[in-house]
Image (spheres, rainbow, N blue to C red):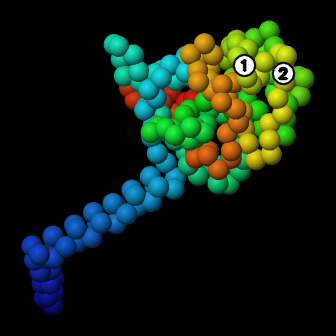
Amino acid sequence: MVEPAPATKKPASPARTFFEWLRALLYAAVLFFLLLQFVLGWYLVPTPSMEPTIRGAGKDHPGDTVLVDKLTYRLRTPRRGEVVVFWPLAASKHPFVKRLAGLPGETIEIRDGRVLVNGIPVDLVGGQGPLRYENLPPYGTRERPVRIPADSYFFLGDNTEHSDDSRHWGFVPAKNIFGRALVVFWPLDRFGWIR
């Protein structure tokens, strides 16, 4: 018995192939947009306020570019020690990236280079080495511990001498926070998780 020859599939027309590719690209573009809008983003850090954790732009090198997780804080509140990206209180073209030092309702003070929360010294960087914070008025001075209002946070830069942070302008409302800095991904020689 002779088997019939298998039916050959007719090749797709160039127009059909083009529209299939166009549809796939459209789906990819929509997915990319949704990811950037609601889940991930990136931010080029222009200042040295978070050095050595995150390097700012300098004469001989670009600043670090960090991957920002926009989803986590939709599911839970920020935690002390996390590096957070937020809009500052004053009008600014760029968001700020700082370390979270104080939570809503806590009292914060800087004494002898240490951050005290409710009178107890805290380690903001999880044992990675001591950071020494300077007392700067009007917030966080030894003579004036401050209570963080409900639904607000207190942020400090790791590079205390070169950081414009909550010691200068006060508290950041929760609504201004939009993400958590997760990874330095550019330049590649600085690639790594942010702690």
Q: Nearer the viewer, residue 119 or 8?
A: 119
Q: Residue at x 61, y 30 (%)?
A: 98
Q: Earlier in the sequence, mark 1 or mark 2?
A: 1
Report helix, strand or loop for mark 2. loop
Amino acid carrying mark 1 in the image: Pro
CA gap, disc 1 to disc 2? 9 Å
- Residue behind mark 2: 144
Q: Nearer the viewer, residue 128 or 162?
A: 162
* Rendered position, 80 above or below 123: below
Q: On the rendered image, what quadrant is the C terminus found in?
A: top right
Neighbour class for label 2 at 10 Å: few (<14), some, many (≥20)? few
Amino acid carrying mark 2 in the image: Arg
Q: Nearer the viewer, residue 2 or 32?
A: 32
Mark 1 and mark 2 residues within 8 Å of each other at the beta carbon: yes
Check the image and name the residue furthest to the bottom.
Answer: 1
The reply to whether residue 168 is visible in this rendering is yes
* Rendered position, 26 above or below 76: below
- Residue behind mark 1: 137
